[in-house]
Image (cartoon, rainbow, N blue to C red):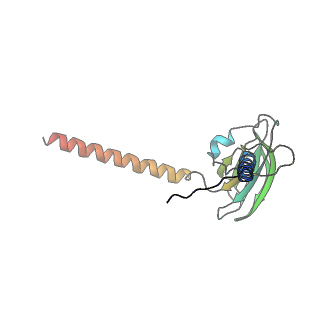
């Protein structure tokens, strides 16, 4: 026996209202920002100050970091120091890049670019989870050397197989 569901006008109105709230609230909700290559971001500069934004920087590393804004000339302007586990919210603009450096070594850690406009008084910041973005140059170099050794080994194996036929 099939069941019948009675959909009344008040139910439809409530459903539409709930969907509208979800759609409109998510349109201005902050997002988790994609970590960017700090070398690339360090070479960027702010373009304009047309659309306000906000970013919550969260230090998820085991070391202290410094937060820098890249100004209109591309100069790194110091804004804050965050110890491991610490966070803070920063008002900014959509086209303003931010770069994170290791406090002890000044090594580049990661970069971010805000993406969610914050019109008026709404404050739902984008989230910048600070983690180590790329391997250290020495580790990266060793990885390339290792890859090269694998390729050389594969080439020798291919030549040996080919010559034995």
Q: What's the residue at 72%, 48% (across, down)?
A: 16
Q: What's the residue at 52%, 52% (across, down)?
A: 138
Q: Nearer the viewer, residue 129 or 6?
A: 6
Q: If the image is split into quadrants, where does the C terminus sit?
A: top left
- Residue 55 makes an appearance in the image: yes
Residue 3 in percent (x, y) is at: 55, 58
Q: What's the residue at 67%, 47% (across, down)?
A: 111
Q: Is residue 75 above or below residue 7?
A: above
Q: Nearer the viewer, residue 132 or 10?
A: 10
Residue 40 in percent (x, y) is at: 64, 40
Left or right, 42 with respect to 4, comes to right
Q: Residue lying at the far front in this picture: please name it.
A: 1
Left or right, 126 with respect to 135, comes to right
Q: Nearer the viewer, residue 21 or 33?
A: 21
Q: Nearer the viewer, residue 12 or 164?
A: 12
Q: Is residue 58 above or below residue 112?
A: below
Q: What's the residue at 67%, 42% (across, down)?
A: 41
Residue 154 in percent (x, y) is at: 29, 46
In the figure, residue 72 lies in which quadrant? top right
């Amino acid at each position: 026996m099939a069941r019948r569901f009675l959909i009344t006008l008040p139910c439809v109105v409530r459903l539409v209202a709930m969907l509208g709230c979800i759609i409109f609230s998510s349109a201005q909700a902050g997002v988790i920002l994609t970590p960017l290559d700090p070398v690339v971001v360090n070479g960027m500069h702010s373009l304009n100050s047309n659309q306000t934004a906000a970013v919550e920087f969260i230090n998820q590393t085991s070391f202290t970091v410094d937060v820098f804004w890249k100004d209109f000339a591309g100069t790194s302007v110091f804004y804050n120091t965050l110890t491991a586990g610490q966070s803070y919210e920063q008002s900014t603009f959509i086209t303003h890049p931010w770069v994170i450096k290791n406090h002890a070594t000044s090594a580049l850690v990661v970069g971010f670019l805000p993406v969610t406009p914050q019109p008026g008084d709404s404050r739902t910041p984008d989230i910048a989870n600070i983690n180590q973005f790329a391997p250290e140059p020495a580790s990266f170099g060793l990885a390339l050397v290792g890859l090269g050794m694998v390729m050389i080994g594969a080439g020798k194996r291919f030549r040996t197989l080919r010559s034995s036929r």
